[in-house]
Amino acid sequence: MDEKIKVYEEKMKKSYEHLESDYLGIRAGRANPHVLDKVKVDYYGTPTPIQQVGNITIPEARMIQIAPWEKTLIKEIEKAILASDIGITPSNDGAVIRLVFPELTEERRKDLVKDVKKKAEECKVAIRNIRRDGNDALKKLSKTEVSEDTIKELEDDLQKLTDKFIKDVDKLMDDKSTEIMTV
């Protein structure tokens, strides 16, 4: 593939990877430690990811257990989880914090699927915008150093790349929707 197209392929790949990481944070009724990825704890004045201040385990299918390395951090971790948007109230026994994931209702599952579809659509729009930027850049080339046939080929390559990433996004969206709707 031409170097002129590589730049846009990288950008599309980043959009796709961003969607993948967003999907990791969407919980589907099972305990998933990735829901804590964006939660930061105030660790001596520095916002620090929970993974760096304690041990995260999954003792049961719908429970996450956080064992902080310093017992004084329990209150800070609880505060950070309550302030986040994961929607689960932590409980602690003085040594560990437990997050129990409730069974998702049918309505909540449908809301999550809508959210999944919305994020996928945003990703597709980003990919199409990258394609548009690429086509604009290719059109500017035409006046200088490249033949019209070469530009047409590059535009076709860019379109094929766009189609591939859109197809990948649709598959990712379908997989995540199926995972959420599976009881």
Image: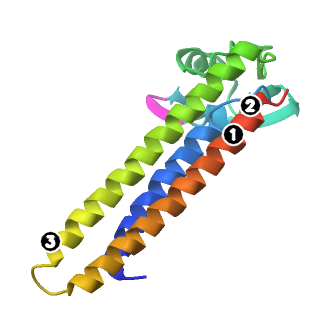
- For label 2, the crowd category at 10 Å Cα-Cα, with few meaning under 14, some 14 to 19 and many 20 or more, is many
- Image spot of residue 174 (x, y percent): 68, 42
Q: CA distance from mark 2 to mark 3?
A: 45 Å
**Does the residue at mark 2 contact the one at mark 1 (Cβ under 8 Å)?**
yes
| Residue at 59% from the left image edge and 48% from the top image edge | 170
Residue 144 lies in the magenta stretch: no
Q: Secondary structure at mark 3?
A: helix
Q: Secondary structure at mark 1?
A: helix
Name the residue that disc number 2 marks.
180
Instruction: Give the quarter of the figure containing the N terminus.
Output: bottom left
Name the residue that disc number 1 marks.
176
- Image spot of residue 123 (x, y percent): 46, 45
- For label 3, the crowd category at 10 Å Cα-Cα, with few meaning under 14, some 14 to 19 and many 20 or more, is few
Q: Which residues are magenta?
A: 44-48
Q: CA distance from mark 3 to mark 1?
A: 40 Å
Q: CA distance from mark 2 to mark 1?
A: 6 Å
Q: How many marks?
A: 3
Decide if residue 116 is on the left or right side of residue 69. left
- Image spot of residue 121 (x, y percent): 48, 39
The residue under label 3 is which amino acid type? Answer: Lys
Report the mark closest to the observer, 2 or 3: 3
**Does the residue at mark 3 contact the one at mark 1 (Cβ under 8 Å)?**
no
Q: Residue farthest to the right?
A: 60
Residue placed most toward the observer, 110 or 85:
110
The residue under label 2 is which amino acid type? Answer: Ile
On screen, residue 177 above or below 7 = above
Name the residue that disc number 3 marks.
140
Instruction: Give the quarter of the figure containing the C terminus.
Output: top right
Magenta portion: prevailing SS class: strand
The residue under label 1 is which amino acid type? Answer: Lys
